[in-house]
Image: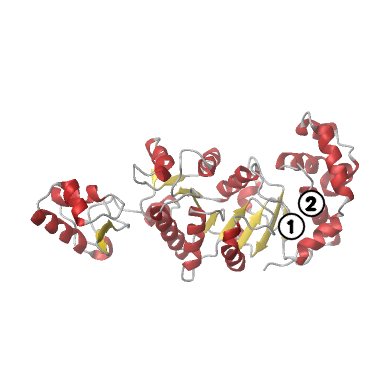
Amino acid sequence: MSDSPMSGGSTPDEVADHAFLAALAGLPAMGPARLRALLGLLGPAGSWKVASSGRLPREVQAVIGPRAASVATSWVEAARTCTPEAVLAELQSVGVTVTRRGEHGYPPALVDDPDPPEVLFSTGRPVVNENGPTVAIVGTRRCTRYGTEVAVEFGRGLAEAGVVVVSGLASGIDTAGHAGVLAAMGGTPPVAVVATGLDIVYPAQNRTLWRRVADAGQIISEAPLGVGPARWRFPARNRIIAALADVLVVVESHLEGGSMYTVTAALERDRPVLVVPGPIRSPASEGTNRLLSDGAAPACNLDDILCALNLVCLEPVSLATNHGAPPVSADPADLGVLDALGWEPTTLDGLATRTRLSPVQLGSAVGRLQRAGLISEERGFLQRCSGRGVP
């Protein structure tokens, strides 16, 4: 766990400011824009004073809008039941750090963001403050086995390449990406950005993964302790993921959902977006394939991502295989088998039906592709092997 909010050489004034910040963030209906308006006008102590008294400046009332009076009343009522000192003590007891924008420990990528979180809560080590490239792996909660395997492969490969991997600790692709990072040998630690308070695990079935990520890396939230999974907090969380990333990788996505919101947030911040191609009949790939048709760059292997980070410079792709294996011939039968196989495991009979090759032609093509390392067989099913040089 990281140092407590009151340790690390903080001055009494800084400790007091963190107490006010934590208490302000915990007030009902205190979104990023409202907190930013308060702090910009009055600072932490002054903001708490007016929020707890209900006497809001006109500038803050304008940000809140027509509900300013009812919001002010709710803040006064909430302030009666807690004190900033008590809020900070609770954070200290569970090892959660409070950081204001611009302070040491606040992620540099967020400082000048167009919609920055004014306050962040974190547990673990400050991974995102270390100077290194960062990739966000995102995707649908309702992923396929194909998507799961790709997310694990990319998470592990990126971590082993020294890249910080960020995701959202949600079910599906997020879970697989984190699992890949944790499986890496000597790789960079994982980073998660969540939409709840750091004392509320969501989804509940990820409790073990949550603990492993916190122990090995860092979990970040804009939400204070005790805050559950409100709908509006997930898009807010996704903007932070997009802002932290140097490159966003979408593994699988339906046409609508949180992943597509993250794509929009990344594009608004001029972040490169890479997309994993998927089977055209898979609903989980409808969104990703649409992004590809709209001009997004494909992420067909780890090198595609590393190239987007300028960590590798690839030669033009040829029909060569990995690790110095012999080149694949341009025999139409070989290319036809690869095209028919796609990215879903298929039996030899299934390939015969799709390609209409004779048994001899099909057997020869499969043999050549296996020797070249472009396809493999497992339990009677043939499948393409991902990696550099795959056509």
In the image, 337: left or right of 10? left
Q: Evaluate if marks 2 and 1 touch, with contact meaning CB atoms under 8 Å apart.
A: yes
Give the CA separation, mark 2 to mark 1: 8 Å
What residue is shown at x 39% (from left), y 48% (from top)?
A: 276
What residue lies at 9% left-to-right and 51% top-to-bottom?
358
Residue at mark 2: 21
Vertical order, 3 against 74 (above or below):
below
Q: Secondary structure at mark 1?
A: strand
Q: Residues within 10 Å of mark 1 (few under 14, many from 20)?
A: many
Q: Quadrant of the N terminus?
A: bottom right
The percent position of residue 371, horizontal first and vertical second, equals: 19, 64
x and y percentages locating residue 108 in the rendered image: 63, 52
Please, is residue 292 above or below residue 124 in the view?
A: above
Amino acid type of the residue that numbered disc 1 sits on in the rendered structure: Val
Q: Residue furthest bottom?
A: 186
What amino acid is found at the position of numbered circle 2 in the picture? Leu
> Which residue does the numbered mark 1 point to in the structure image?
98
Say if 55 sits above or below 142 in the image: above
Mark closer to the chain start, 2 or 1: 2
Q: Quadrant of residue 313?
A: bottom left
The image shows residue 323 at horizontal and vertical percentages of 27, 65
Classify mark 2: residues with Cα within 10 Å, few (<14), some (14-19) or many (20+): many
